[in-house]
Image (tube, grey):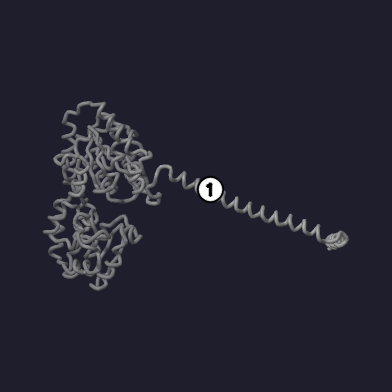
Amino acid sequence: MSLTILLTNIALVARSGTEVVVEQLADGLRRRGHRPVVYAQQLGPLAEEMRRRGHLVIATPQGLPWRPDVIHGHHTAPTMAALAAHPGVPALFLCHDASSAFDAAPPHPRLRRIFAVDERCRARLVAEGVPAGQVALLRNAVELGRIPPRPPLPAQPARALVLSKHAAHLPALRQACAAAGLELTEYGAGPGRMTDQPEALFAEVDLVFATARTALEAAAAGAGVVVCDARGCAGFLTQARAAAWLPWNLGAGILAQPTDAAQVAAAIAEWSAPEATAASALVRTHCDLEAMLDQLETTYRELLAEPLPADPLAEAAAVGAFISAWTPHFDLTAPWRRLAEQVAPALPPLQAPLEPWAMAVRADVAALGEKIDALEGLQRQAGLAATLRRLWRATTPVALRAWLFRLRQRG
């Protein structure tokens, strides 16, 4: 059965984690005969690229030529907007981050399935009020068909790669790699050198320093992986560690050690080509995009088969609560402000609602005070001049004053 699936995301600009997820989901669903539509609030180069490949990408939730069968939601605001724009359509929500303000599950009666990409996200959703039994894991997946073949790993690594959006840990990686005789190549927002094809890089190196989706892709490509970034270091990825760490998405939940030169050197020293190869096989088995698409297709059909009672009062209450929390107002601790500070770090820190006005008034008062001081100074100078003129007239003979006047005019 072919379905129209509305995928939501906060942005479709570059190739951040969820943007890659949406792109790969849209590609995979279309290969399987479905009709994916992507709605994102911020569009950019990735959206244009997907449009060139034939995808329908929209910037408003109601801009569809067809009614969706299912809403597949990522991120709070676009998911809620899609639910409000399409009454009667069931939805699922997938949480990708354990702390981002825009990854909270929107409380809406038509949100019938809630997923988390790892255990940290699951704990976040439960802490925010979602019943634990209603949160299932839906791990990040790797599109194995995009990964080129690579030669077998050497007995000892020679070439290393870091692909990271962080920069603070790069000096430690450089020091440890230099000590181990490894040639290190740097990519990502942290080093300021971007790539659209990380899969090709993974085939050219022996060891990759990365976390989360990037670490999954590197392992699936057959490279050895040290799971680390600026937040911390977990260590070299072996088969046993892969089994234990995959439920945590190779992410922040396992980064128990500091990413310093000593810790990175110890992880490099754990290098084992057979262990890296075994870990790669495990990742490829459990994180295959096709298996994820199988799970999603099953979920979509379950949603459509379940009765969906109309409850306009509950839906209106959910939308009202969302507007109250997510539109700008004087409570600067509300979710809208946390989101604004997260996506625009240049915003001023939290302050009282009238503080900007008060600061402007104080500045105006200070400027006015300076002008008053200047006027008082001029007044004092004018008073002194008048006194001197009176003394001049009282003490200087008239004839002398007249002669000096004519002399000044002549000069």
Q: Nearer the viewer, residue 387 or 291?
A: 387
Q: Position of residue 132 (x, y in %)?
A: 15, 41
List the residue tagged with mark 1: 365
Please tell me whether residue 111 is drawn above or below residue 348 in the rendered image.
Answer: above
User: Residue 70, can we see it?
Assistant: yes
- Helix, strand or loop status at disc 1: helix
Please tell me whether residue 397 is drawn above or below residue 57 in the rendered image.
Answer: below
In which image quadrant can residue 220 be found?
bottom left
* Quarter of the image with the C terminus in it: bottom right
Amino acid beneath label 1: Val
Q: Nearer the viewer, residue 156 or 129?
A: 129
Which residue is drawn at the image coordinates 56% and 50% (left, top)?
369
* Quarter of the image with the N terminus in it: top left
**Label 1: how many Cα within 10 Å (few below 14, some 14–19, many 20+):** few
Please state if 333 lies on the left or on the right of 277 as rendered: right
Give the residue at the far left of this rendering.
240
Q: Position of residue 328 (x, y in %)?
A: 37, 39
Q: Position of residue 158 (x, y in %)?
A: 23, 70
